[in-house]
Amino acid sequence: MLDQDPGIEPGDIRLTDVSLAPGYGQLNDATVQALQLTAQCEGLFFDPVYTGKTMAGLFHLVQQQELSGNVLFWHTSGQPALFGYGNRLLD
């Protein structure tokens, strides 16, 4: 609509479901690790339902060396959902 080149092509966008199991709203080890690492190292708090699983997927792609160049991780909030999982996230 702006008649501007967006600078990305459809092939630049990666979709993966590697971190979705065991299902919606259910934690997995990769998500818990991503939540802990981003909180401890970056001071970022993600919800475990969407953003935490997405960060776990991003970590997986990095570990598998499937990414190169710049990466945009668009965090759109959701922190209040974190409190609903407190008992399962605290040691």
Image (cartoon, grey):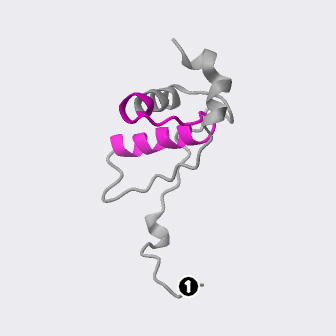
> Depth check: 13 or 84 in front?
84
Instruction: Determine if the magenta segment contains residue 79.
Output: no
Q: Residue drawn 54% across and 15% down? A: 90
Q: Residue drawn 64% across and 26% down? A: 83
- Locate residue 76, reporting x and y percent: 58, 49
Q: Is residue 62 left or right of residue 54?
A: left
Vertical order, 57 against 12 (above or below): above
Q: Quadrant of residue 24?
A: top right
Q: Residue furthest bottom?
A: 3
Disc 1 residue type (three-letter): Leu
Residue stretch rendered in magenta on the structure: 38-63
Q: Residue furthest top?
A: 91
Instruction: Determine if the magenta segment contains residue 58.
Output: yes
- Numbered disc total: 1
Q: Residue drawn 46% across and 37% down? A: 44
Badge 1 element? loop
What quarter of the picture does the N terminus occupy?
A: bottom right
The reply to whether residue 22 is visible in this rendering is no
Q: Residue drawn 53% across and 49% down? A: 75
The reply to whether residue 44 is visible in this rendering is yes
The residue carrying mark 1 is 2
Q: Is residue 64 left or right of residue 75?
A: left
- Locate residue 7, reporting x and y percent: 42, 75
Mark 1: few, some, or many residues within 10 Å (few <14, many ≥20)? Answer: few
Dominant secondary structure, magenta: helix
> Depth check: 26 or 1 in front?
1
Vertical order, 44 against 76 (above or below): above
Vertical order, 73 against 79 (above or below): below
